[in-house]
Image (cartoon, rainbow, N blue to C red):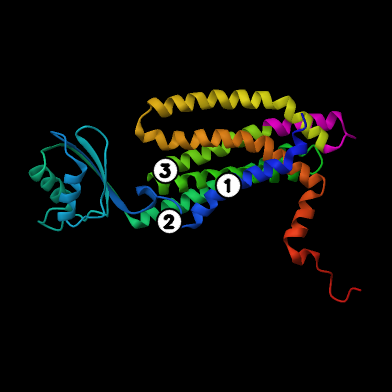
Amino acid sequence: MDIVGKRAWFFLISGLFILPGIISLIVPPAMKPGIEFSSGSIVDVTFEREISEDDIRTELARLDHPEALIQKTGENSVFIRMDVLEPGVEDEPSERELILDALGENLSPVTKSEVDTVSAIFAREMVQNSIIAVIVAAVVVFFYITWAFRSIPNSIRYGTAAIVALVHDMIFILGVFSILGKAMNIEVNSMFIMGIILVLGYSVNDTIVVFDRIRENVARNIDRPLPGVVNTSIMESIGRSLNTSLTTLFVLLALLLFGGPTIRGLLLVLAIGVGVGTYSSVCIASQFLVIWETGELGRFFRRVIPFMRREPAGSL
């Protein structure tokens, strides 16, 4: 089967799947941030009896919190997200106490409550640290793969191809969560960042499996053109990659169905990442090596960037 010969189709398919996500990321808000990435307070309340969301929304609007987002997490429990609740000053009660007292008196007695607040400064730091963590992980991956494949010509291309596949995976996942945030109010939080970093590791592992087979076949067939070597290597390793990915996906889907809501975001990132990571290892990273080797990459840039075709000043 000539997988390498269909590389143009793979790039086209990736572009078509990534494009809606990019458009969604451009349209503000790009994503729906969780409380870790935007200041606010979360109140988890359990009542003695069942209370409707509309009753809670009406009561919170009366307490000057019409922006509150309310979601039932059980028959008698609700999850409320709102602006930062102000602490008490001297003898005055805090906003937290006022809201819980009002809910308990006007709706139903409160049997359990938990309140978490994140300031704007902490939220900004979380965003910055998350971006830095992902960038550092990508840089380490680039240098490690370049070093690990130093025994074959142009090892830097292998590190670059791995990063291209990682960027492909990250853009796809971010686009999917951007669409889900607009359509289903799914938030990105610290679990999302944890999932992104785990996907980085999984995708790189899958890519290294294919690259390692390419390295072995390059050493055995020095004079053979790289496209043929890459195609043979993919065919020899694709069964292992698919079996590993499918096994992992079955476990993740089972956890998604029966796991708790606190880890659902993490599991969703991993499930999407495992699928797209397997695809990118075979159809993006490996094909990127081929188009670089055959000169297709350079020809593409010369077509897309007009100034690369300009002749030096004074030339005839």
User: Horizontal and vertical percent for residue 171?
Assistant: 56, 47
Q: Residue at x 12, y 53 (%)?
A: 93
User: Horizontal and vertical percent for residue 130?
Assistant: 47, 48
Left or right: residue 32 compared with residue 3: left
Chief SS of the magenta region: helix
Q: Are marks 2 and 3 in contact (CB under 8 Å)?
A: no
Q: Which mark is residue 29?
A: 2
Of the two numbered discs 1 and 3 on the same chain, state the one appearing first in sequence. Answer: 1
Find numbered disc 3 in the image and state the secondary structure of the residue it sits on: helix
Query: What amino acid is found at the position of numbered circle 1 in the picture?
Result: Ile
Relative depth, front residue between 277 and 54: 54
Of the two numbered discs 2 and 3 on the same chain, state the one appearing first in sequence. Answer: 2
**What is the quadrant of the C terminus in the image?**
bottom right
Query: What amino acid is found at the position of numbered circle 2 in the picture?
Result: Pro
Relative depth, front residue between 206 and 59: 59
Question: Can residue 160 be seen?
Answer: yes
Q: Name the residue tied to disc 1.
A: 18
Q: Are marks 1 and 3 in contact (CB under 8 Å)?
A: no
